[in-house]
Image (cartoon, grey):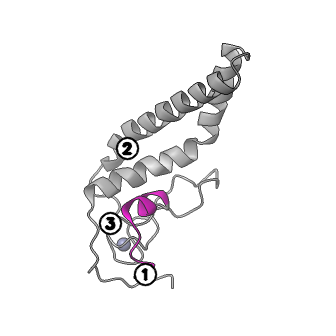
Amino acid sequence: MEHLHESEKGYLHSVLSQNCPRCRKGKLFAHGPYHLRKFFLMNDSCSCCGQTFHLEPSFYDGAMYVSYAIQVALFVTVFVALSVLHPQAGLAWHIGGITSLVIVFSPMTYRLSRSLWIHFFVKYNRDAKVKCSHE
Ligand SMILES: [Zn+2]
């Protein structure tokens, strides 16, 4: 088995770790997901290959639908799991509990949806000139 170099992350790994879609090394976001005042701030461009993360004005509007889909999927999954595991708990408890869960996870879904969105439009380029400015 050939050892995978750090820059050769798989597609899903790159989406989940919110890396630059082009070189899969740079970071899309400037801060951690639970930096509550700044979790939504993206870098303007990749610090490794220079790929811009703002392809056009309001590029990320479409990511809202992805975020919505992730939240609905999360809601349904947890709802079904709870109904199976705790069928005796009332419906109000289920909905209340899941709603708080969805809110707690919203910084993550927000970031994941944007990461998925830009990965959808920017293709991986293994030959991209990579020189990380923060290294
Ligand atoms: Zn990059």
Residue located farthest toward the front when viewing the structure as drawn = 1
The quarter holding residue 94 reads top right
Percent coordinates x, y for residue 29 in the rendering? 49, 61
Task: Please say whether residue 103 is one of the residues in the magenta stretch.
Answer: no
The amino acid sitting under disc 2 is Ala
The amino acid sitting under disc 3 is Thr
| Residue at horizontal 29 percent and vertical 50 percent from the top | 57
| Residue at horizontal 53 percent and vertical 35 percent from the top | 74
Percent coordinates x, y for residue 22 in the rendering? 31, 69
Residue count near mark 1 (Cα–Cα under 10 Å), binned few <14, some 14–19, many ≥20: few
Q: In this picture, which residue range is highlighted in magenta?
A: 4-16
Label 2 vs 3, first from the N-terminus: 3
Label 2 vs 1, first from the N-terminus: 1
Judged from the image, the secondary structure of the residue bearing numbered disc 3 is loop
| Residue at horizontal 42 percent and vertical 75 percent from the top | 47
Residue count near mark 2 (Cα–Cα under 10 Å), binned few <14, some 14–19, many ≥20: many
Percent coordinates x, y for residue 37 in the rendering? 62, 51
Report the image quarter containing ligand 1. Answer: bottom left
